[in-house]
Image (cartoon, rainbow, N blue to C red):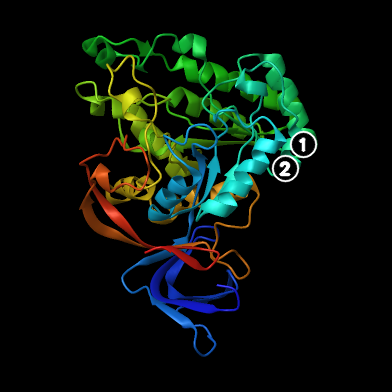
Amino acid sequence: MKDRSLVIAGARMIDPASGREGHGAVLVRDGRIADVAWGAAPDAPEGAERIDGTGLVLSPGLIDMHAFAGEPGAEHRETLKSASEAAAAGGVTTLVAMPQTNPPVDDPAIVDFIRRRARDTAIVNVLPAAALTKGRAGQEMTEFGLLREAGAIAFSDGDRSVTNAMVMRRALTYARDIGGLIVHHVEDPDLVGPGVMNEGERASRLGLHGIPHAAETVVLERDIRLVGLTGARYHAAKISCTESLDVLRRARAAGLPITAGVSINSLTLNENDIGDYRTFLKVAPPLRAEDERLAVVAALSEGLIDVVVSDHDPQDVETKRLPFAEAENGAVGLETLLSAGLRLVEAGQIALPRLLAAMTSAPAAILGIEAGRLAVGAPADLILFDPDEPYVLDKADLRSRAKNTPFDEARLQGRVKKTLVAGRVVHG
């Protein structure tokens, strides 16, 4: 869109960063927002392209802080190209690619590879997260400074926890000194053990080993104390139970620099949805009981939980078409992130601006990027969507290479009509 202008008019605009909402128009020029006119039309140059947003919602593009994009080493599950196409279809304009690739993203050369590969093949913004420890083995820190210089947006071991408290303390200390962000998967593998779903009556009835809440809260409690020692910026990747919410409240009351996310799966599904061993609903953390789900939704609504993530984790047929206990964790989620979240809006459990804030301005603030706002000078990463359009999801229609969606044949509502990245239409 360089040297070209675009006007999006007539839409209901929501700016989650400021909380402002109303009808108006946006002028885009050279990939950025040049004007935001609330209740009016901006002064547009002659010949500017126009998009009619009547009946639609215009908001910043979604920012997904937790997605697996496949490359390098797992291209059979997903590629940066296919992940970006799935993201664009779901209204995600920026995604953070987790480091559990093969090899893992523990070397500056791999960070550089992902950035170059994304530049050449992806249609949305891809921000690589670097591994927290070498080989994601949890024993030796990676070279944070070099990885950050190469373009790493954050440091995480992806779907693994660092169980060694001293390694974690050193990582937090070094991250603090360079202004880095630690994103941690809070789940103790020893307490998980052979567990494959939420511990409780439902697991017993299905004859499956359960995962206790303590597997999450023990790690989170430890990390909170280490943040208190170091003062580092820390983000708990995916919270799923009430005990963790209590830990978060104490941390916030103490003024610690801690933020938290939640998977869209934990917000919209519960352990009963597993039904007769549906492996597409085997995820980590596991789906909890309904009262836990409602508590997490309430925590998101009040702002205790900051961001919502897709937890996009494509798996192939060979790893999912197995007995439940043997199947891999993971579900695709980029394309259904917004639609699934709108279930909560329809149920009156959360306001639309708050949901959008958790998917746009909040992750942008945590990551320290310019996106996530309807403001002059911001990147023109925008989406137009119909929040009321119903549809039944057919997994065959997904752009992702993998089809392991927990929402297959589910009734959803909310269709993304157009997705723009840097002012260029990449979907719709």
Image point 56% across, 21% down: which residue?
Answer: 161
Name the residue tied to disc 1: 146
Farthest residue in the bottom direction?
46
The front one of 412 and 268 is 412
Q: Is residue 153 visible?
A: no
Q: Secondary structure at mark 2?
A: helix
- Is 293 displayed left or right of 392 in the figure? right
Image point 43% across, 40% down: which residue?
Answer: 310
Label pair 1/2, CB-CB below 8 angstroms: yes
Q: Is residue 328 visible?
A: yes
What distance separates the C-alpha of mark 1 from that of mark 2? 6 Å
- Is 278 displayed left or right of 174 in the figure? left
Three-letter code for the amino acid on which mark 2 is drawn:
Ala
Image point 49% across, 20% down: which residue?
Answer: 216
Rate crowding at label 2 as few (under 14), some (14 to 19) or many (20 or more) other CA atoms within 10 Å. Answer: some
Position in image of residue 83 (x %, y %): 45, 45
Above or below for 283 versus 198: below
The front one of 31 and 106 is 106
Name the residue tied to disc 2: 150
Q: Which quadrant: the C terminus?
A: bottom left
Above or below for 361 versus 136: below
The front one of 337 and 422 is 422
Position in image of residue 141 (x %, y %): 72, 23
Three-letter code for the amino acid on which mark 1 is drawn:
Leu
Rate crowding at label 1 as few (under 14), some (14 to 19) or many (20 or more) other CA atoms within 10 Å. Answer: few
Image point 66% across, 49% down: which residue?
Answer: 368
